[in-house]
Image (tube, rainbow, N blue to C red):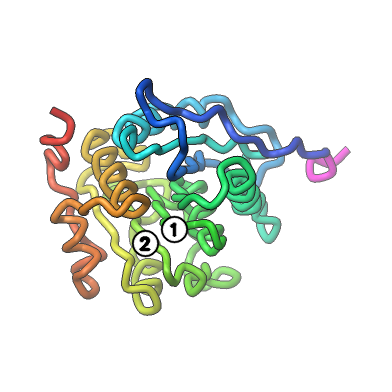
Amino acid sequence: MAQSALPLSAARLGRAVRTAGAPTAVSGVVLLLPDGEADSHRRPSPLSYALQLPLARTLARAGQEDGLAVHIVRYRCRGWNATDAHLAADAEWAVDEVVRRYGDVPVCLAGHGMGGRAALRAGGHAAVDSVLAMAPWLPESGSDEPEPVKHLLGRRVLLVHGTNDARTDPELSFRLAERAKKTNRDTCRFEVHSDGHGLRQHRAEVMALAADFIRGSLFGRAYARPVADALAAPPPLGLRMPLAAGFGKSLRS
């Protein structure tokens, strides 16, 4: 039997990551979308889920007082799979599930790699308030149709990319951010100099940036100055904002 003919299991939400002492009521939700592959109908790797846990815990701690719940989405399969766009469809299903469970709360889609593309593609869902795409995998210019951006109008959008990423081209995320900024001024992009696809060299700064953006977008907290400046700056300044070493250090101490 061909691989594409195998039945796909249903997408699922991982158990909510929350911290002790957080309010019982959930006031906002982050859906973490793991990395995937361009073409595959295999089940997702448990490692892709596990890699999201440190960020999930960091965000849960940062949003404890605000009633933030963090879920890691478990895809049906690990592949985007051309026009099927399975990961984006699973992200949209996950937002619907959040609405069913929690009601009318703001949602942030936060994805890495292929999950970053899924976050951007599913960002037009009515319940989505903001989108965070980290090292997003994007198709080469001129291949098929360009990634849509007009549906992101009204959302706050942050892209983060390592300048030494050998798996996903940082220039492609810049070009997408440039197109998105023309229709949605609430778009910015940070560059993590010398970092690769996993954004591990400056992990603490990336996590602090993610937490600052999410708390500001979902709960109206004041953004850190670099984030506020990036959102306000015209292109290309606000789309090539360097992530400074030590960003968020005072919040982590």
Q: Residue at x 37, y 51 (%)?
A: 218
Residue 14, x across and y down, in percent: 57, 30
Q: Which mark is residue 129?
A: 1
Mark 2: few/some/many CA within 10 Å (<14, 14-19, 20+): many
Mark closer to the chain start, 1 or 2: 1
Residue 209, x across and y down, in percent: 25, 45
Inspect the image, locate mark 2, and give the three-letter code of the amino acid beneath it. Answer: Arg
Membership of 139 in magenta stretch: no
Question: Quick check: marks 1 and 2 in contact, CB under 8 Å?
Answer: yes
Residue 150, x across and y down, in percent: 49, 74
Inspect the image, locate mark 1, and give the three-letter code of the amino acid beneath it. Answer: Asp
- Give the labeled residue for mark 2: 156
Mark 1: few/some/many CA within 10 Å (<14, 14-19, 20+): many
Q: Secondary structure at mark 1?
A: strand
Q: Nearer the viewer, residue 206 or 3?
A: 206
Q: Which residues are magenta?
A: 1-6
Decide if residue 1 is on the left or right side of residue 205. Answer: right
Membership of 2 in magenta stretch: yes
Q: Quadrant of the N terminus?
A: top right
